[in-house]
Amino acid sequence: MLKDFNGYLQTDGYEVYNQFDKKQITHVHCMAHARRYFEQALDNDRELASHALKEIQKLYAVEKYCRENNYDIFQRLDLRQEKSVPVLQSIHLWLKEKITVVTPSSAIGKAISYALTRWERLMLFAYDGRLEIDNNLVENSIRPIAIGRKNYLFAGSHQSAQNAAMFYSLLGTCKLKGVEPFSWLKNIFKILPDYKVNRLEELLP
């Protein structure tokens, strides 16, 4: 699916995605995943983990401010350059310093190593206002599918599974576009029989 793709690809740190780090694809990492490792390390080293979490929270405060003030991508980029980049540089120096004093196999060691080895990709969001700091929007949208995954082993047939996938895509689009799905579906079923097949795209939410 991505062999001819040209643009940004934002993922967690799962190594299988490294194959997409090519010239035509800019691979961006997710700050929420890096943050999660420090959260899990609180019981291991509260002082270091808490420091990392507080610094990362400064980055999220910038993102929140941009959202609340309806910043466009250019305003968001300017504010990130002013506020987020210095924090990112400070965190990077801290990571390089602390990696030498923690046990690699410890929870805090793994958290620092995870962030440090992916730092260039974690910083990319601060240099393009179109990018998000994390891929939580995607994670939230696929969570219902992930939760129900075992149920889909018993979709009934291959065609039933495809039908379910299409409905998920359409209803997910409704949600993203602020379209009430039941009203949309009722309207579609009323006008669909008389609609020309080459104009079906007009009916999408």
Image (spheres, grey):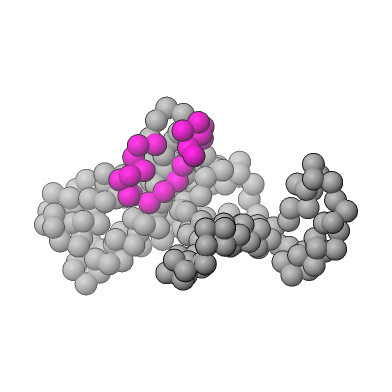
Is 63 placed above or below 120 here? Answer: below
Residue under the image location 26 percent in, 51 percent down: 114
Is 197 placed above or below 61 here? Answer: above
Q: What is the magenta range?
A: 1-20
Image x and y of residue 135, in percent:
47, 54
Residue under the image location 45 percent in, 53 percent down: 134
Residue 11: say if magenta. Answer: yes
Residue under the image location 85 percent in, 51 percent down: 195
Residue 174 occupies which quadrant of the picture? Answer: bottom right
Image x and y of residue 1, in percent:
49, 39
Is 175 placed above or below 20 here? Answer: below
Is 180 left, or right, of 66 in this rendering? right
Q: Is residue 187 visible?
A: yes
Residue under the image location 40 percent in, 58 percent down: 32
Image x and y of residue 17, in percent:
36, 43
Is 92 placed above or below 66 here? Answer: above
**Residue farthest top in this picture:** 23
**Residue farthest front in this picture:** 157
Is 51 left, or right, of 7 in this rendering? left
Is 125 left, or right, of 111 in this rendering? right
- In the image, 70 versus 169, the foreground residue is 169
- In the image, 73 versus 132, the foreground residue is 132
